Amino acid sequence: MNFIKRAFWNMKAKKGKTLLQLFVFTVICVFVLSGLTIQSAAQKSSELARQELGGSVTLQVDRQKQMEKQQDSGEKRSFESTPITVSDANKLAALDHVKSYNYITSASANAGNFDAIESSSSSSSDSSSSSSSSNAKNSQGGGQGGPQMVQADLSIEGVISTALVDDFSDGDSKITDGRAITKSDVGKKVTVINETLAEENDVSIGDSITIESATDEDTTVKLKIVGIYKTTSSGDDQAQNFSFLNPYNKLYTPYTATAALKGDDYKNTIDSAVYYMDDAKNMDSFVKAAKKTSIDFDTYTLNTNDQLYQQMVGPIENVASFSKNVVYLVSVAGAVILGLIVMMSIRERKYEMGVLMAIGEKRWKLIGQFLTEILIVAVIAIGLASVTGNLVANQLGNQLLSQQISSSTDSTQTANGQMPGGGGGMGGGMFGHSSANANVIDSLNVAVSMNDMLVLGGIGILIAIIATLLPSISVLRLHPKTILTKQE
């Protein structure tokens, strides 16, 4: 008799056990498929986030080496300004994987033909603060950076593009009138100022303002206002004491204009350069290529930063790891459970096997019959899982992701509460607060793919084979006579 026909007849005759096997196998397949599809969705989301967020590499002075050189030469260690030439920065901008870049030059200045927004201390204390503000313009500016910074009214940030500055890319600041600073403004004397500063001085788009160097009163720069921005930044706590720390007193200019304010020694130089990668995974190859250029990396250093990407994909990777463990656990547990069910079924059919072997039926055909029965159940279970698995995977995956995001957010807030706050002073080199304002990937686009179905089919068949062979071998190794004589 054909063992395949016997398999169908047995399944029809024992519908209860067949349905039990089908239910168990379907549950196993649904969870395995959910794990597989969640992994696939997490991987796609991770790759998308990596490509969109990328990472940044900042070229700047190596302060540690600078201090070590001063110590080795017996000099008193001090903070020295070591600008980067634009030609060196351009060498890295021309390398592969650079999606965009920003050159940063910062300076402090005094207001010329307009008034800066005063700090609160200057309102409450006439003699100390207002005299400091008025004497700033008459000061010879000698000495160290501390006194120079105290005397300054304004902070000036020179860039290629304000759109790449953290405050603007995060949404803390936005242009409300006019336009932003762009690459086409390099070499021009233009500026974007805060709307509070503009309202206080009754200036608007097209007007010109004059700023004076905080270190050299003879150096002045006339800037045309091309944009006005609004900021939600509360600034540094010290802003109440020093006007230049007040976020309303911050001006953005092309980096060339800020360099002009700092003097002839800074012509065609910048303080740092931030290179944004097309993909976070390409940062290492960019750094390797950069090290092969003629840039003096005994003086300068490259700092890589993919913190925003890592924080963004952290919850996604945790979900993917969990779903992977689910696949392993369910597969092993499913094989064990099905194996026990099949073993119980086979033990109840000892007499049937003994009779078939006594009349000459091959042992492998008996195993083939059991395997056919479980494979038919497996095929139906996989079909049912393909219909319901996507819904289950969506609910499970997004619930897990939501929990991971909540946990990650709590951890980040705790960490931020223990660490001093940082802005985006380097124009994007350090993400600081920007990661908190990024659009978090809060859902997974879970969809069953053909590859997931193929993997599920392979796992399902493997479970069916293991669950059938192990208990079958333990029974079929007995002789027909032994089976029949022990049958009661």
Image (cartoon, rainbow, N blue to C red):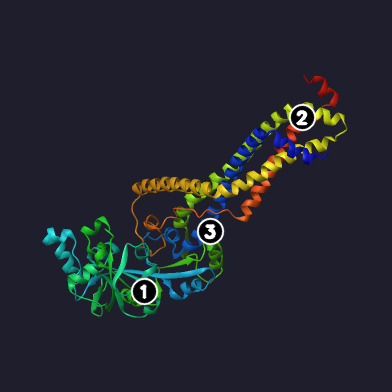
- Name the mark nearer the viewer: 2 or 3: 2
Q: Name the residue under label 2.
A: 474
Q: Which sits earlier in the primary sequence, circle 1 or circle 3?
A: 3
Label annotation for residue 255: 1
Residue 78 occupies which quadrant of the picture?
A: bottom left
Q: Residue furthest right?
A: 360
Residue 140 occupies which quadrant of the picture?
A: bottom left
Residue 11 occupies which quadrant of the picture?
A: top right
Q: Mark 3 points at which residue?
A: 47
* Kind of element beneath mark 3: helix
Nearer-the-camera pick, 92 or 405? 405
Q: Which amino acid does label 3 sit on?
A: Glu
- Name the mark nearer the viewer: 2 or 1: 2
Q: What residue type is labelled 2?
A: Ser
Q: What residue type is labelled 1?
A: Tyr
Q: In this view, does 150 lie to the left or right of 260?
A: left
Q: Is residue 427 left or right of residue 123?
A: right
Q: Which sits earlier in the primary sequence, circle 2 or circle 3?
A: 3
- How many marks are shown on the rendered structure? 3
Label annotation for residue 323: none
Does 326 sit above or below residue 123?
Answer: above
